[in-house]
């Protein structure tokens, strides 16, 4: 139950004048520290999976742990894919388990950013997934992930923001008003007047990327001007790195486990500080009461095959069909099984795991699925029963 729709969570923060922390999950130590902070503070939280982090680790291997952490939580959790580079990467993230996506095309000209974001919105909304757009450009200065954001700062225009939100249909908008990715050099000067105009011109929650280095007062003023989600990673990474260096200094020949001692608690402590500062502490119960739970769906067909078709033939046909079905947005996995009981009513099953009920509708109406059913599947099988199952 605690895995909830990201848009519901952010809208609640927007309407009640606080911000939800979207904390970057660099590894399991970060995941455990962030979740413990959210539980300790009874706060909603967004687990942020940043695409560039997966250049050196396996996204699909980490995602089951992220989903497990969200499912067993007692506070509302959403899983967001951050700074994706394409529509394909957004589809991959949804397939892996994210229920929010942000594909960053903000470095492109306005029209290209708009059209590419709109394509992502159309695909993701059909699956029930929240979409964050970005307008203006937040560059990187130094520190982790900064190298992935080269170039100069480009401020968000209120007039362009209004048109962008209306024409793309994004659920929230990341804006550029003076923050940077990575570490700040000196105290940043944030354009609050510009932010206020953007808020007046749009009707969606606003998002700040590059929260590291801002003062407590700056965070409060951002939230007072409509910021409802704050992305935060570099400070967590810097503090974790500092703790590791302290461990090395204390025991240069320490084991791998000894060098990582305290990293989880360091991440937890900084996340707790942010949660309290941003006003989301103690909000878990009211957010859960107003958020839709996020449920996966299983589309299962139990069937038999006639004696004229061998099991190897049906297996081969289904295997080929899976290639096209797995490319449908919202499909997470496809499996085939046969019963162990020889006298069972149905001998075979085909199970399709989908991101949501909305994704089920997309799947059932998709040309690839209808082509597989009508051309390959239904002509081969005899009696069958189809069930659509929702987790509970």
Image (tube, rainbow, N blue to C red):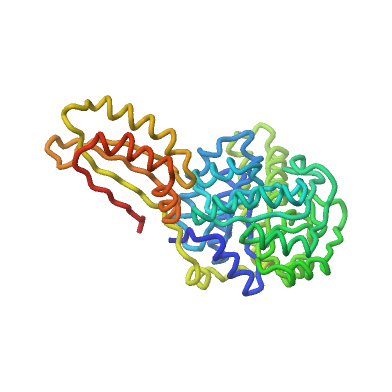
Q: Residue at x 75, y 54 (%)?
A: 210
- Decide: is 340 above or below 242: above
Tell me residue 150's x, y (percent).
80, 42
256 and 34: which is toward the camera: 34
Mark count? 0
Q: Who is closer to the viewer here, 295 or 319?
A: 319
- Residue located farthest toward the left when viewing the structure as drawn: 343
- Residue 205: % across, % down: 66, 66
- Residue at 53 percent across and 69 percent down: it is 287
Viewed as shown, does residue 334 lie left or right of 67? left
Residue 240 coordinates in the image, percent (x, y): 68, 46
Is 228 left, or right, of 4 in this rendering? Answer: right
Q: Quadrant of residue 46?
A: bottom right
- Quarter in which the N terminus is drawn: bottom left
Is residue 48 shown above or below 312? below
Image quarter in which the C terminus is found: bottom left
Residue found at x 16% / y 29%: 307
């Amino acid at each position: 139950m605690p895995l909830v729709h990201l848009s519901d969570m952010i809208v609640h923060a927007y309407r009640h004048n606080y911000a939800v922390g979207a904390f970057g999950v660099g590894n399991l130590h970060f995941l455990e520290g962030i979740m413990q902070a959210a539980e300790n503070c009874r706060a909603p939280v967004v687990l942020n999976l940043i695409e560039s982090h997966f250049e050196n680790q396996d996204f699909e291997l980490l995602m089951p742990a992220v989903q497990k952490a969200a499912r067993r939580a007692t506070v509302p959790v959403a899983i967001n894919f951050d700074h994706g580079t394409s529509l394909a990467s957004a589809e991959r993230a949804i397939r892996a388990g994210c229920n929010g996506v942000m594909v960053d095309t903000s470095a492109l000209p306005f029209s290209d950013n708009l059209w590419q974001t709109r394509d992502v919105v159309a695909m993701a909304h059909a699956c029930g997934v929240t979409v964050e757009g970005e307008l203006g450009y937040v560059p990187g200065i130094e520190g982790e992930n900064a190298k992935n954001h080269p170039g100069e700062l480009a401020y968000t225009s209120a007039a362009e923001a209004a048109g962008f939100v209306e024409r793309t249909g994004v659920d929230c908008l990341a804006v550029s008003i003076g923050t940077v990715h990575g570490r700040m050099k000196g105290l940043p000067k944030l354009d609050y007047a510009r932010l206020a105009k953007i808020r007046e011109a749009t009707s969606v929650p606003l998002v700040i990327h590059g929260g590291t280095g801002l003062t407590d007062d700056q965070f409060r003023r951002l939230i007072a001007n409509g910021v409802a989600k704050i992305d935060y990673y570099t400070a967590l990474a810097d503090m974790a790195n500092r703790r590791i260096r302290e461990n090395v200094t204390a025991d240069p020949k320490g084991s791998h486990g000894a060098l990582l001692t305290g990293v989880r608690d360091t991440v937890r402590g900084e996340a707790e500080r942010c949660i309290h500062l941003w006003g989301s502490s103690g909000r878990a119960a009211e957010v859960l009461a107003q958020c839709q739970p996020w449920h996966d769906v299983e589309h299962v067909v139990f069937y038999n095959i006639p004696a004229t078709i061998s099991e190897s033939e049906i297996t081969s046909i289904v295997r080929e069909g899976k290639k096209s079905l797995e490319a449908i947005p919202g499909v997470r996995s496809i499996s085939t099984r046969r019963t162990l009981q020889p006298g069972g009513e149905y001998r075979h099953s085909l199970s399709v795991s989908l991101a949501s009920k909305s994704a089920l509708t997309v799947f059932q109406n998709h040309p690839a699925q209808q082509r597989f059913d009508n051309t390959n599947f239904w002509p081969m099988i005899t009696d069958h029963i189809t069930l659509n199952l929702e987790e509970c």
